[in-house]
Image (cartoon, grey):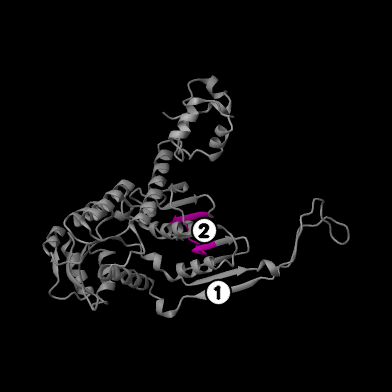
Amino acid sequence: MKQIKYAIIGQGRSGADIHAKYLTTDKDRFKMIAVADPLQERLNHAKKTYNYDDSVMLYTDYHDIFKHKDLDLIINASMSHQHYPIGMEILQNGFNVLIEKPLANKVQEVDNLIAAAKKTGKVFAVFQQSRFAPYYIQIKKVIDSGVLGRIIKITIAFSGFSRRWDWQTIDALNAGGLRNTGPHPLDQALRFLDYEGMPEVVCHMDCANALGGGDDFCQLIMKAPGRPVLEVEVSSCNPYSPFLYLVQGSCGGLKATTNRADWKYFIPSEAPVITLSEKPIARDDGGPAYCGEQLPWKEESWDLPPEHADLFITISSRFYSMLYNTLTEGMPLEVTPEQVRQQIAVTEECHRQHKARVAGKPAFFVLPAVYGNKIAAGRIKSAKVKKAVKKNSGKPVFKKADKKNSQTKKASKKSRYKVRK
């Protein structure tokens, strides 16, 4: 069995307590060569906690890792704002790279990483390990089975109550709840959305208790043609968190936590036949009635197997098994950079809307398709609007007009918005 020689940049909560914690238990497939962290005490603590071999090199400058030309993989678990620049350095120095989430701050940065990986011919992977969570796999299995009917809405809430004052609350360091925790539910949500383009996004963010100014409340809704509504909440302001998942379908629904899932559904062919009544319906005694029926509900459940009780170990093991097959056999990545690119596009749009609101400006909304339909029907005559629609199809094109005087305030609703140049 081939051993993957690896190094880890960063020995904090991720580099040591997730990556090293798992990889040091899988020595048949992975061999640690070096680790780096600017804090010597972090290096010493990690070596002692996870029993690094004496041969493992400890560096305070991650550039020293590049001296090991025989490395098969470098894991970039640095601070969030360093993921992109250090990830780029790793690729440019000719190494395969696994980058922690959040992958980047902007879509352009993801595109640059993808281009660098193609140019160097190296593997570029992103650590989105929640794709392999047992609860997610089970929920997807139920949805894909079709028993819930057409899926109307999926709500995912990674919420609890906490106050934070560490660097991961500092917005300037690419931190905040949406970037810290959000990549997990967002990655899952986008798989359920199953849409290659940019979905419609409406997002509201707030900072309640995070001392660094980053968001500790985020609620976003995504929608795409022919897809269910996806609602994602990442909140540190919710002391009552009854579910992780809530799925609504035309034939039933599902609720789930990380440890258990329950779903309830009926089979349409077994349900009472109903027909539309154009007249008011009545009870047997002639009084007014509401629609009511007894559906033949079926209920099922799933419990997390005891062997998967340690969620971090379970999902890390599954992710690294996938990555091992990619590095040794050339198997395609199950989590691709292109998929994560879509996630970064959504995150970037959420922050754009938030910054606009904080600045007292409209957050802007995607031009509704109805405008395009009206133009096609010749009901909108403005050449300026037509030009804007053609140029900015699917992009924000309206902004609030300046109120110059009291007469403007009394103007009709049609004059309240103008096309952005």
Which sits in the foreground, 273 or 313? 273
Which sits in the foreground, 359 or 377? 377
Sequence order check: which comes first, mark 1 or mark 2?
2
Residue 205 screen position, x and y as percent = 43, 48
Residue at 49% in and 30% down? 386
Which sits in the foreground, 239 or 154? 154
Tag 1 residue: 301
Inspect the image, locate mark 2, and give the three-letter code of the amino acid beneath it.
Answer: Thr
Q: Is residue 174 left or right of residue 10?
A: right
Q: Can residue 398 be seen in the rendering of this structure?
A: no
Q: Which residues are magenta?
A: 229-246
Which sits in the foreground, 28 or 406? 28
Q: Would you place residue 78 above or below residue 28 in this image?
A: above
Q: Would you place residue 157 above or below residue 30 in this image?
A: above
Residue 213 screen position, x and y as percent = 35, 48
Question: Disc 1, disc 2: CB below 8 Å?
Answer: no
Residue at 30% in and 49% down? 111
Inspect the image, locate mark 1, and give the three-letter code of the amino acid beneath it.
Answer: Ser
Kindly state the secondary structure of the residue where label 1 is placed: strand
Tag 2 residue: 155
